[in-house]
Amino acid sequence: MSVTSTARARAALAATAALAVGGLLLACVSSQAGAASTGLKTLAEAKGKYIGTELTGNMVYNSTVTSLAAGQFDMVTPGNEMKWDTTEPSNGSYNFGPGDTIVSFAQSHNMRVRGHNLVWHSQLPGWVNGVPRNQVQGVMESHITAEVSHYKGKIYAWDVINEPFNEDGSLRQDAFYNAMGSGYLADAIRTAHAADPSAVLYINDYNIEGENAKSNALYSLAQSMLAQGVPLGGIGLEGHFIVGQVPSSMLANMQRFAALGLDVAVTELDDRVQLPASSGSLQQQATDYATVINDCLAVTRCPGVSQWGVGDADSWIPGTFPGQGAATMYDNNYQPKPAYNSTATALGGSTTTTTTTTTTTTTTTSSPPPNSTCTVTDSVNAWNTGLTENITIVNTGTGPVNGWSLAFTLAGGQTITSAWNAAISPGSGQVTAKNVSYNGSVPPGGSVSFGFQANHTGDTSAPTAFTLNGTRCATG
Ligand code: XIL
């Protein structure tokens, strides 16, 4: 179990000691255990696995999201950009621009891509349902060939078929089944293979994580496909869980597919809770995430686990399951949740007991420096070799701030590995955080928050000497 402690470090006051008059110093020593701050992908790679994330829409334009995506994950799944309604909105007219954007992002950050998806009853443009039955096969094959060829060599694995089963194990009566019967499945896989023989070709579905009627039907289908030489390469367990309900038969289920000679990946992991999330449900979520990671680690043919989204703020869950959410490893402000720590720990992040000194200073009287127009508050969450820091700047001046640049000094040994709501450089020593596109304006009395994750070598103090646009800030 890993726990982080909050240290309200007020080291800034040491640097500006003249500010504090009659300060009250509280100090306590706490024991804690923490997971390593090493990015999840480094931990996963050391175990021979990948750890992925879904990106969609404007997530690739949000620096908070992209720095976490690139810093923590090494596999990307486009959430919507490779689906039929985007890629072939009308017959024979293709649009790969949105998917290309995500592939470029992944490639420029050394991340691989899971292509998602080629044949699915949902997010299927209306024109496909209007195609005469005797032409559906040609339409489906053309779609697969065009898309897989476009991305040839850039896709690690394709979800060729998405969600083909009903809960009872029968096949969905969608446009493809209605036109071709169950033969559409093998035909789709063979067509994709012809266009890119290197991609691993998957059938992906939900509620097939444990052993049940649906996964049994998929198992029989996979067996018969392999017997016929269909180039099926993997089974995707989506992993959209309800907290506390990861099936106990998940490991055995993964093992039986692996024993067929198939890869078996967790492709869309999230774990939803009733909102507002209680600390108990987030602890259970941490347990669930660790269970999923451990199941993958226990199966050689499990290449990795992908989460659906980076943080709760970009998760599809609240929009689809009203009243539920908080389903990912990062909260709405992209702060790591207990599930992040349990994932890191399951992936082999060191869990050591360390002793941290927490110092709290309450200033009863303070004199802000002359011309001060800002107050900065900060909080640190530290574990054995890593920390996250949240900083809030309050505009205490009478005029608006239009574009901000906050300079400060990091404690020795701290190196920033990712940041949100600000662009920070360099990564250590004297650093400057600048606003990003959406948070540059701070009205009088208003505030703005940003944060970062850093490695440390023992000194978990908060930064000192905050200067906003050249003016020293008070610390609150
Ligand atoms: C979801 C996306 O996250 C949403 O943005 C979209 O509105 C609907 O689809 N199973 C899948 C994914 O295979 O493609 C779905 O993604 C989630 C369920």
Image (cartoon, rainbow, N blue to C red):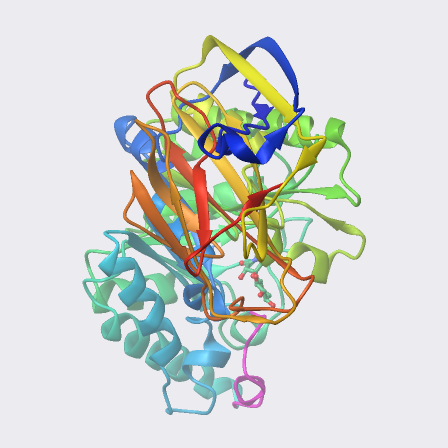
Position above or below: 8 against 126: above
Q: Is 156 left, or right, of 35 in this rendering?
A: left
Q: Nearer the viewer, residue 326 or 406?
A: 406
Q: Residue at x 58, y 84 (%)?
A: 129
| Residue range of the region highlighted in magenta in the rendering | 121-131
Please say whether residue 242 is one of the residues in the magenta stretch.
no
Q: Residue at x 54, y 37 (%)?
A: 336
One can see residue 230 in this view: no
- Residue 367: percent from the left, percent from the top? 62, 41
- Residue 49: percent from the left, percent from the top? 32, 34
Image quadrant where residue 138 sits: bottom left
Specify the quadrant that holds the N terminus. Answer: top right
Q: Residue at x 71, y 57 (%)?
A: 318
Please say whether residue 129 is one of the residues in the magenta stretch.
yes
Position above or below: 421 against 363: below
- Residue 145: percent from the left, percent from the top? 29, 75
Position above or below: 201 against 135: above
One can see residue 270 in this view: yes
Quadrant containing ligand 1 = bottom right
Q: Nearer the viewer, residue 416 or 219?
A: 416
Q: Residue at x 45, y 21 (%)?
A: 35
Please, what is the dominant secondary structure of the magenta stretch? loop
Q: Is 48 left, or right, of 332 in this rendering?
A: left
Specify the quadrant that holds the C terminus. Answer: top right
Q: Is 339 left, or right, of 93 in this rendering?
A: right
